[in-house]
Amino acid sequence: MGTVFYNYPKEKSAFINPEDVTKRNADFPERCVSTFSENIINKFASLDGVEVIDYLYTANGRTPVYQFIYRDTPIAFYLSRVGAPACAAGLEEVIAMGAKKILLFGSCGILNRAADDKIIIPVSAVRDEGTSYHYLEAADEVSADADVIERLTACIERCGHPHVKGKTWTTDAIYRETAEVIAERKETGCLCVEMECAAAMAVAKFRDIPFAQFLYGADNLDSDSWESRDLTEYGLSGAEKYMALALEGVLAL
């Protein structure tokens, strides 16, 4: 029996599909934004004019999907769960609801100080997780769509934010980022490490959905010992900047 990594299921339809458990929402916005920071989501959910338009359901409870109007355009936003499987399931379900263009953003660990204090645009992701192998043939990496990268880069430049493009390392096991593996990933050009990008890119490619992601540094692994920095804040101090950039970015897709 081949492992999941080499036994890719070629059938487009599964035994259980997102539309089997998720109702289509005729009023769902074409554009959707998501992040992993509950604090950021709650901050914007409390604004005037924001409304709940749907829910994602799991054994952890229900997750609201919100909508607000930005530049005369309705945009949905919701909290993505941490980890590749949970993030991918949420993406699948908002696509089933009606999302057609998606932008995801979140924090990461810095592997290269060249990415410090910059918006990181992943152009590819090392597939050191399991979820992406259910969506794409086995390979070491998955690449972002070149046109999407060009659009997002132009948007970030227009907004005046320092940025860097490069490779990210998506891992399932944050407590197994050993010194040896970190050195390997840095050697292959990874700027940062996180837990969802490879899977999110794979879902978007499989469903043929324009998808972009940007990251911002939290903790630092490019040092002799781990620097937690503002990891536990999850980007709250930059919430307005990140959300504004996400909204501009999803409009550019």
Image (spheres, rainbow, N blue to C red):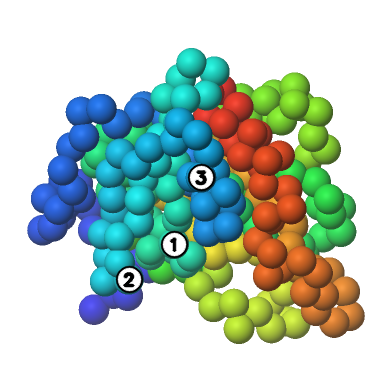
Which of the two labelled residues, at mark 3 and mark 2, occupies the earlier sequence position? 3
Q: Describe residue 57's horizontal placement relative to residue 77 as left or right.
A: left
Question: Residue at point 73% right, 48% down?
Answer: 238
Q: Residue at x 60, y 27 (%)?
A: 248
| 1 and 2 marks in contact (CB < 8 Å) | yes
User: Which of disc 1 and disc 3 is earlier in sequence?
Assistant: 3
The residue positioned farthest toward the front in the image shown: 48
The percent position of residue 219, horizontal first and vertical second, equals 75, 68
Is label 3 or label 2 in front?
A: 3
State the residue position of label 2. 60
The amino acid type, in three-letter code, at marker 2 is Asn
Label 1 sits on residue: 81
Of 18 and 191, nearer the camera is: 18
Quadrant position of residue 182: bottom right
Q: Residues within 10 Å of mark 3 (few under 14, many from 20)?
A: few
Task: Kindly give the residue lying farthest to the top in the view shown.
Answer: 72
Label 1: which secondary element? loop
Percent across and percent down for residue 3 are 32, 75
Indicate left or right for 5 with 192 as reference.
left
Residue found 58% across the figure and 57% down from its top = 39
Q: Which residue is mark 3?
A: 46
**Amino acid type, callout 1:** Arg
Q: CA distance from mark 3 to mark 2?
A: 22 Å
Q: Residues within 10 Å of mark 1 (few under 14, many from 20)?
A: some
Residue 239 appears at what percent x and percent y? 67, 47
